[in-house]
Image (spheres, rainbow, N blue to C red):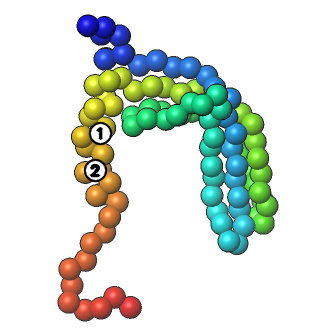
Amino acid sequence: MNWNGVFTRRQFDVPCQIEVVNTFESLRADLRLQDGVTVNPGDEVLVHGEPVVVPYGERGVFDRMATVTRASWIYRQWVRMTGDLEFMELCEFSFSERAVL
């Protein structure tokens, strides 16, 4: 059995494009990795360069480099098993009898 990647992580650099929209209708930031790179559970992406600032009412597109750190196999399995539980921490439930206005 090949144990490479079970406990180890690997890093590589890839070009990316950042799109930031700062308007009344939308406030969002999208990151697109080039060369067909996909991000899997547990992976980390670090974008290099100066902080992105887009004035209100505008849209900006920036080309940068990013370092992708692939999660080890064992960490990826851990993230898959516990991811749903961590998502539930973001949810807020209320079981009161009165209506929320």
Residue 49 seen in the current view: no
- Pinpoint residue 15: horizontal percent, then vertical percent: 68, 29
Numbered disc 1: secondary structure: helix
Q: Could you tell me which secondary element the residue under label 2 belongs to?
A: helix
Relative placement, left or right, of 89 versus 57 is left
Look at 45% across and 25% down and name the residue there.
Answer: 70
- The image quadrant of residue 1 is top left
Residue drawn at 32 percent across, 64 percent down? 91
Q: Position of residue 83 (x, y in %)?
A: 30, 45
Q: Position of residue 71 (x, y in %)?
A: 40, 27
Mark 1: few/some/many CA within 10 Å (<14, 14-19, 20+): few
Residue 99 placement: quadrant = bottom left
Q: Identify the amino acid type marked 2.
A: Asp
Task: State the residue position of label 2.
Answer: 84
Q: From what the image shows, is residue 13 above or below residue 39?
A: above
* Neighbourhood count class around disc 2 (C-alpha, 10 Å): few under 14, some 14–19, many 20 upward: few
In the displayed structure, would residue 29 be above or below residue 26?
A: above
Can you see residue 19?
yes
Q: Residue at x 51, y 20 (%)?
A: 11
Asked whether, in this view, residue 38 is left or right of residue 99, the answer is: right
Rendered view: 79 above or below 58: above
Instruction: Provide the residue designation for mark 1.
Output: 80
Give the x, y percent position of residue 57: 78, 66
Mark 1 is on which residue type?
Arg
Q: Distance of mark 2 from mark 1, alpha carbons?
A: 8 Å
> 87 left or right of 81?
right
Q: Among all residues in the image, which is located at the extreme top?
A: 1
Above or below, 79 against 67 in this view is: below
Query: At 28% from the left edge and 32% from the top edge, which residue is drawn?
Result: 77
Q: Name the one closer to the observer, 45 or 35.
A: 35
* Towards the viewer: 76 or 54: 76
